[in-house]
Image: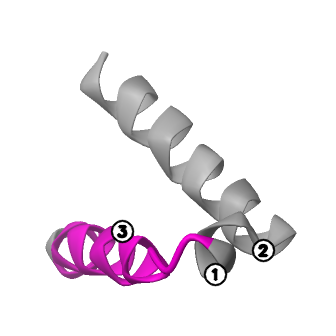
Amino acid sequence: MLFVLYYIVAITILVLHFTGYLARRNVEWVVLVLAVTVFPAVIYL
């Protein structure tokens, strides 16, 4: 269940990033936070 929630949040953040919404609101750092949360999972697998 948490994986589904994580993927929904990640897809939402990516859509907002590519539409420019995050840049207009100066919260582009959210993409970096998302990348940092993915990194340990990639190392673990």
User: What amino acid is labelled 3 in the image?
Assistant: Leu
Mark 2, residue position: 20
Residue 34's disc is: 3
What amino acid does circle 1 point to? Ala
Quarter of the picture containing the C terminus is bottom left
Outermost top residue: 1
Q: Position of residue 30 (x, y in %)?
A: 38, 71
Q: Nearer the viewer, residue 13 or 26?
A: 26
Which residue is drawn at the image coordinates 31% and 15% (left, top)? 1
Residue 19 at x, y = what percent? Answer: 84, 66
Residue 42 occupies quadrant? bottom left
**Residue 5 within the segment the image draws in magenta:** no
Stretch in magenta: 25-43
Mark 2 / mark 3, whichever is N-terminal? 2
Q: Are there few (<14), some (14-19), or many (20+) residues within 10 Å of tag 3?
A: some
Label 2 to label 3: alpha-carbon separation: 16 Å
Element type at marker 1?
helix
> Identity of the amino acid at label 2?
Gly
Q: Which mark is residue 23?
A: 1
Q: How many marks?
A: 3
